[in-house]
Image (spheres, rainbow, N blue to C red):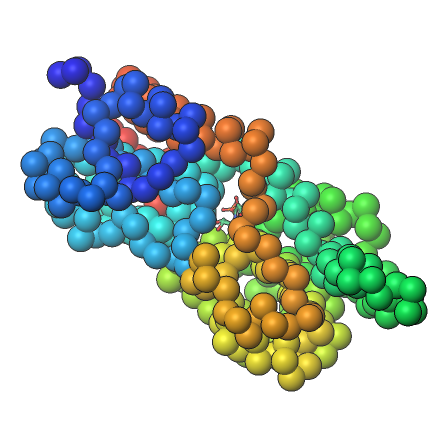
Amino acid sequence: DAARPELLQTGPMMPMIEAQLSQHFIVHRLDAPDAEAQLAEAGGRIRAIATGVGSTAGGARRVTQALLARLPKVEIVANFGVGYDSVEVAAAAARGIVVTNTPGVLDDEVADLTIGLLLATVRRIPQAERYLRAGLWPKGGFPLSPTLRDRSIGLIGMGRIGQAIARRLAGFGRPLAYHSRRPVEGLPYPHYPDLVALARDVDVLIAILPGGPETHHLINAEVLSALGPTGILINVARGSVVDEEALVRALKDGTIAGAGLDVFAHEPNVPAELIALDNAVLLPHIASATHVTRNAMGQLVVDNLLAWFDGRGPLTPVPETPVPG
Ligand code: NDP
């Protein structure tokens, strides 16, 4: 036992992760009833943190500066998910702590779901299915829907997943453009340094960029108004990137036509106003949620921790992380 490093798990994780963690580490739980006592007793020995359950619950920062201050020996924070906005990464970096995430293994899965949500929203697929199930078809056909055929599409974020979405969209034969801080070399799509200008020029916006303070409410009333009355917003990024109140207003008053959302500001709570709207398609943060992909993500969490304590360095450190010396 003396050889096993001590690790803090911030909440429930997949059984395949928990089984491996308990095999290789002495695990303490932040969600245990006696968490305070565990922290007080073991805080000085804990060398690793495992966090994230696939949803960041509204950007709640589970690995905070305050928590790290109580754990002076922590060397690594392994986050489940490519998005790590639940970790105060600057505070971790300042303490020389390595943060890892799970990039790459979920790109195609998330891109597939994004296409599904896009089509569901534009063609009103869930609404049509509800119509059939409600027995309304014999009374008349489902109302005609908007189309993707006359739309141009703007991606907000053109990283690993954005490019996987763009590859799929190429098959749809619709014009594509994107916004990010820097253009991506070698891509044929127009780059917009200004998000409002992109919103003005396209008919669909798809958000696939990180959450956190830098992108908080990037998609605000001004952007929605620029997107316009036939516009559709798809958000598979983080709830925090959209001003949710402004979005509800825009959907209610026809500022935009519809929205497809996989993520929300205060997960798992979705505003009743949003649920009441027929022009919104709402999913419970499922973009990466398949057995195959979640297992691959889980294994990468464990493998990052094992590689670190084997002296092989982190496998997938986030860009803000200090280079291990
Ligand atoms: P990458 O880091 O590969 O790409 C991020 C993209 O966002 C880049 O194009 C980057 O370009 C852009 N970006 C970053 N900051 C800003 C900013 N302030 N303003 C404008 N653009 C910005 O990430 P991934 O593609 O792997 O993942 C993207 C995000 O998707 C994750 O961080 C996560 O939050 C979310 N996600 C959601 C899932 C879900 O379940 N719904 C599943 C998986 C991921 P540049 O740096 O040039 O600005």
Position of residue 224 in the picture relative to residue 2 (left or right): right
Number of labels in the image equals 0
> Looking at this view, is 113 or 130 the one in front?
130
> Looking at this view, is 284 or 182 the one in front?
284
Q: Which corner quadrant of the image does residue 49 belong to?
A: top left
> Looking at this view, is 83 or 239 the one in front?
239
Residue at 13 percent of width and 45 percent of height = 36
- Can residue 270 be seen by looking at this rendering? yes
Against 83, is 191 above or below? below
Against 71, is 203 above or below? below
Residue at 41 percent of width and 42 percent of height = 53
Q: Which corner quadrant of the image does residue 206 belong to?
A: bottom right
Position of residue 10 in the picture relative to residue 166 (left or right): left
* Residue 308 x/y as whole percent: 30, 24
Against 172, is 278 above or below? below
Residue at 63 percent of width and 76 percent of height = 251
* Residue 204 x/y as whole percent: 70, 65
* Residue 231 x/y as whole percent: 71, 71
Position of residue 76 in the picture relative to residue 17 (left or right): left
Looking at the figure, which quarter contains the N terminus?
Answer: top left
- Can residue 304 be seen by looking at this rendering? no
Which residue is the extreme one toward the bottom? Answer: 253
* Residue 168 x/y as whole percent: 74, 44
Looking at the figure, which quarter contains the C terminus?
Answer: top left
